């Protein structure tokens, strides 16, 4: 895109004095990672791409389903019908919105084994996840690598957001200790889409402040609200706790969990994720499984409806979703029966 084209596209953003032409140039040189391309992630990606960042990298392990369309703004019914991976569907849509931004779409689970590779070269990480296990992983990796982490959460009509900057604020563990979260998810008690937009917009705003260098404007509080019941408040972020393993101990517990989560329950979804292979040749497994199951496939995944009633979803990176059960033993039994150990 030429300078004149950029000036026209981003003219209203550059008229905003805290950004201006200089801030816009800085944005064009920045790279951010969005982990999770569900409700929060799609809004975050939309804002980052439209704002004119240099690179937007996003990673998600799942594919589009009809139940996503109520709140995940980048997807449509065709994506759901074809079971397109969220990262791929998002890239297809975002590339039509701003061809001047480099988009990196990764279909994968974010784990301790790949997080260093995912955040390499990034200026900031945005939380689009729905669970604290992954959030602590992002927190630990960001603080180890001195990268700001923008946290966000939305459930029911409630939302919250904060930005954590290594060396300047405490981390997520200083604010919410493991085990202190409510455990409520949108799969369990629902969520309304306006709340998602509000939370992600708070996150995106803090990201823009940091990326253009307006540190004086950065919010130093956790903001929480209930949009349905008209409630909101802010809590000052705590200083680094003396017993925080990350901030004061320079230990990163979530990064030590490589290989420990080979069977993970996806909360509220009757799904167990199993990671036990280096990769799947989808064409090979389509030919093998269609002898015993009803198959639906695309270049990114393969779904097999099993005679037992459950469903296997295979991904090229070696992951399998066993859908229709919350029992890890049952999931591993089906995995062994149809995939092998």
Image (cartoon, helix red, strand yellow):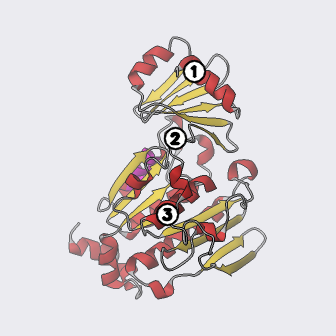
> Which one is in front, 88 or 76?
88
User: Does 89 appear in magenta?
Assistant: yes
* Crowd around label 3: few <14 · some 14–19 · many ≥20 (10 Å): many
Q: Position of residue 189 (x, y in %)?
A: 75, 52
Which of the two discs, 3 and 1, labels the residue nearer the N terminus?
Answer: 3
Query: What's the magenta region?
Result: 87-94
Q: Position of residue 177 (x, y in %)?
A: 67, 64
Distance between the alpha carbons at the discs numbered 3 and 1: 36 Å
> Marks 3 and 2: which is nearer the front?
2
* Crowd around label 2: few <14 · some 14–19 · many ≥20 (10 Å): few
Q: Which residue is mark 1?
A: 336
Q: Is residue 128 visible?
A: no
Q: Which residue is mark 3?
A: 126
> Marks 1 and 2: which is nearer the front?
2
The image's mark for residue 88 is none
> Which one is in front, 32 or 247?
247
The residue lying furthest to the left in this view is 2
> Which one is in front, 289 or 226?
289
**Residue 293 position (above or below residue 30):** above
Local secondary structure at mark 1: helix
Which of the two discs, 3 and 2, labels the residue nearer the N terminus?
Answer: 3
Q: Which residue is mark 2?
A: 259
């Amino acid at each position: 895109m030429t300078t004149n084209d950029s000036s026209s596209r981003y003219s209203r953003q550059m008229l905003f004095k805290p950004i201006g032409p200089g801030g816009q140039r800085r944005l064009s040189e920045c790279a951010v990672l969005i982990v999770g391309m569900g409700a929060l992630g799609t809004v975050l990606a939309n804002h980052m791409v439209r704002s004119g960042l240099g690179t937007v990298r996003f990673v998600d392990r799942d594919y589009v389903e009809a139940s996503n369309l109520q709140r995940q703004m980048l997807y449509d019914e065709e994506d759901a019908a074809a079971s397109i991976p969220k990262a791929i569907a998002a890239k297809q849509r975002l590339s039509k919105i701003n061809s001047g931004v480099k988009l990196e779409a990764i279909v994968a689970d974010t784990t301790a084994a790949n997080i260093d590779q995912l955040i390499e070269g990034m200026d900031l990480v945005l939380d689009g996840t729905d669970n604290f296990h992954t959030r602590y992983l992002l927190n630990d990796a960001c603080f180890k690598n001195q990268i700001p982490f923008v946290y966000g959460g939305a459930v029911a009509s409630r939302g919250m957001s904060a930005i954590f900057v290594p060396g300047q604020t405490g981390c997520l563990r200083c604010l919410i200790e493991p085990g202190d979260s409510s455990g409520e998810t949108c799969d369990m008690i629902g969520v309304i889409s306006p709340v998602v937009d509000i939370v992600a917009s708070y996150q995106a705003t803090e990201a823009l402040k940091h990326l253009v260098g307006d540190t004086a404007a950065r919010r130093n509080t956790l903001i929480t609200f209930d949009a349905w019941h008209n409630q909101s408040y802010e809590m000052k972020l705590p200083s680094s706790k003396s017993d925080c393993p990350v901030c004061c101990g320079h230990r990163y517990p979530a990064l030590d969990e490589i290989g420990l989560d080979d069977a993970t329950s996806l909360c509220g979804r009757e799904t167990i994720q199993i990671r036990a292979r280096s990769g799947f040749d989808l064409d090979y497994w389509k030919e093998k499984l269609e002898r015993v199951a009803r198959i639906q496939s695309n270049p990114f995944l393969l779904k097999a409806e099993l005679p037992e009633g459950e469903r296997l979803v295979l991904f090229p990176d070696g992951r399998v979703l066993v859908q229709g059960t919350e029992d890890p033993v049952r999931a591993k039994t089906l995995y062994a029966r149809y995939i092998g150990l």
